[in-house]
Image: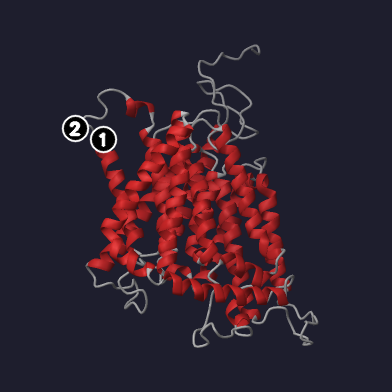
Amino acid sequence: MKPGRRKSTLEYPATGPDGVQPTEKLSFGTEIVKESGRSKSGARTVSTFNDRMALFLVALVLIAPIPMGSNRPVPWMVWSFVLNLALIVQIVTLSRLDPKRPLRSAAHRPVFIAGVSFGLFALLQILPLGLFQSNGLIPETISLVPRATILGALRFASYGALFMLVLEVTTQATRIRRMAWTLFFGLVAHAVWAMVSLTLFGDQFFWGEKTAYIGAATGTFINRNSFATFMGMGQILGLCLTMERANRPHMRRPGRNSMASPDLLETVFLWMYLMLIALALLASQSRMGVFATFLGALVAFVVMRSKGTGNSARAVLQALGIGVLAVVATLVLFGRALIERSLFTVQNGETRVQLWRQTLGMIRERPWTGYGLDNFRAAFELFHRPPLSVSVTWEYAHSTYLTLWAEMGLIVGSLPLIAVMYITLRIVRVLRSRKNDYAISVAAAGIVVLGAFHSLVDFSLEMEANVFLFLTILGMGAAQLRRKRARSDGW
């Protein structure tokens, strides 16, 4: 101990309020505690700013689905402007408050390298390169509809800004939990609206009369499959948060689960909220949406139970038992609607196979350059042939993988998939090393499973509102917490 310095009675945590490594012990009195060159009051200012930015991001993610899932050019431009402006404010403010603070997103450089490469190639597609094609034509640009590609690039820029912002603010376990719980309750509100609009308001769309998917819950989305993915991510997130809360040490003490216990009432309400989301999901009548959510939730349940009990075999058996009960309950409650839709599965399957076959023909013609970001609809008309009905205009390939390869080529089109795989590996590393505060990481792994399977046969993750929620949960799950110990308050 240095001469003239009082010995502290309290050791500061492994890091400061926002993940900054302290250089001295915490002492009481008038002495200022230095943390990486900034005062304790400065650390609190940074933490407060990040708290507000986190609340802003969660609010944006919950508002984004309201204008038709943000699947329109105007929301794309608005969210791109708002998020990129927020990113500038975040970087400038933190550089002023704490010049020595490193960018947390720098730990995920491969993701941003892939994203920037994807965006730059989209801009390359709108340049008049005069490339020769196999049919002898000399197109002015790679993109068939350059304006659509520009809008697509703006939308993609908003994804990068959002993911970077999430990584920058998720430096505390308590802040991540607050974000996750707020997201969950917001998703419950979306589920409530979906069921109310379906049952009490005569199946009305948020902005007026529905013209498609009559009798199916769509919430604020136009497409039931996209809504099902949105609800599925909420189901997995809520399941992990509820299981984590049930595993808190004080929840397992004798007397905490009596009939009059506030903790028990809270648990009951949380499971009721999960049931509301499940009912909205089933009411969407999305076959793949329900199946993909089931797989993602199954993975999340097994990992949560394995981490909590240390018994993986028992967790798998419990998951199988719950899965059987869930299937039976689904058939009892919504069996007729799902069975009726399943009768058309073979016919729809044949149509999808024809669509995918002709899309593969598109990819073979331009395997490296693609036809331009957001150009699938225009490009597919050049290859649209019977037996696929020529009276139908196909806006999507009903497979996000094929859409990426058709629009951006095999190499660049695979970059988003590689980025998600990289983030998933980071999440797995987090799960292996972390003994607590792992619920959001498990939820992130679960929604990756959901998205990977649903994207095989649909385009739900091509809706901006769904991508926002997907990236936000992934960012929270991949966060690198610098604190050795975080307070587990459950909420």
Residue 105 seen by the camera: yes
Mark 2 and mark 1: Cα distance apart in space = 8 Å
The N terminus lies in quadrant: top right
User: Mark 2 is on which residue type?
Assistant: Ala
The residue that appears at 70% across and 69% down in the rendered structure is 409
Q: Nearer the viewer, residue 268 or 68?
A: 268
The percent coordinates of residue 432 (x first, y second) are 57, 34
User: What is the crowding at mark 1: few (fewer than 14 residues within 10 Å), some, or many (at least 20)?
Assistant: some
Q: Secondary structure at mark 2?
A: loop
Against 344, residue 251 (above or below) is above
The percent coordinates of residue 315 (x first, y second) are 43, 36
Q: Secondary structure at mark 1?
A: helix
Picture disc at residue 197: none
Quarter holding residue 334: bottom left
The percent coordinates of residue 242 (x first, y second) are 37, 41
Against 92, residue 19 (above or below) is above
The percent coordinates of residue 151 (x first, y second) are 59, 74
Circles 2 and 1 in contact, beta carbons < 8 Å: yes
The residue indicated by pointer 2 is 260
The residue indicated by pointer 1 is 264
The residue that appears at 38% across and 47% down in the rendered structure is 323
User: Mark 1 is on which residue type?
Assistant: Leu
Residue 482 seen by the camera: no
User: What is the crowding at mark 2: few (fewer than 14 residues within 10 Å), some, or many (at least 20)?
Assistant: few
